[in-house]
Image (cartoon, rainbow, N blue to C red):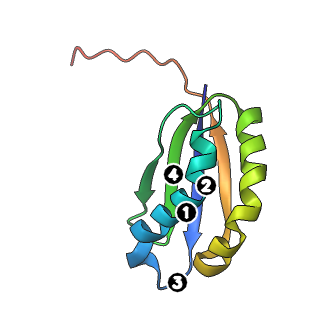
Amino acid sequence: MITVVETWFLKAGLETQALKIMQEMDEIVGPGGHSDPGWIAHGRFFQSEEEPGRVVMMYPWESRESHERVTEAEEPLLLQFCADYCAQPRVIEYFTELPVEVEHDH
């Protein structure tokens, strides 16, 4: 399993509409992603306090390869969405969780 981190960059002036805009994005690509065998769980969305036009979405996925396949299929579906709302293309990064042991005897 990997963690996918997508960073979206909203156009100036749209920061206050981030929730509505990201919900629209999810309605466009969610059905295809959720039906893919690589899908593990719903994403979580975070709006930057320093840069409110930057929204980060994080979610687990089976593998990078299966996610890249889904992402390629999403691109045509997102063309108009990105033209309407995005200042630049989304950035997708992949992370593997490190098995850090944390002691709680403080």
Q: What element does badge 1 sit on?
A: helix
Report the disc number at residue 12: 3
Counting from the top left corner in percent of width and height, residue 45 is at 44, 53
Residue type at tag 3: Ala
Q: Which label's residue is closer to the chain start, 1 or 3?
A: 3
To which residue does mark 2 refer?
Answer: 29
Q: What element does badge 2 sit on?
A: helix
Residue type at tag 4: Met
Relative to 1, 50 lies left or right: left
Q: Disc 4 vs disc 3: Cβ atoms closer than 8 Å? A: no
To which residue does mark 1 refer?
Answer: 25
Residue type at tag 2: Val
Q: What element does badge 4 sit on?
A: strand
Q: Disc 2 vs disc 4: Cβ atoms closer than 8 Å? A: no
* Residue at the image position 58 percent from the left and 57 percent from the top: 7
* Residue at the image position 51 percent from the left and 51 percent from the top: 57
Disc 1 packing (10 Å; few <14; some 14–19; many ≥20): some
Q: Which label's residue is closer to the chain start, 4 or 3?
A: 3
- Screen quadrant of the C terminus: top left
Relative to 89, 35 lies left or right: left
Disc 4 packing (10 Å; few <14; some 14–19; many ≥20): some
To which residue does mark 4 refer?
Answer: 57
Query: How far apart are labels 2 and 1 at the CA level?
Result: 6 Å
Relative to 12, 45 lies left or right: left
Q: What element does badge 3 sit on?
A: loop
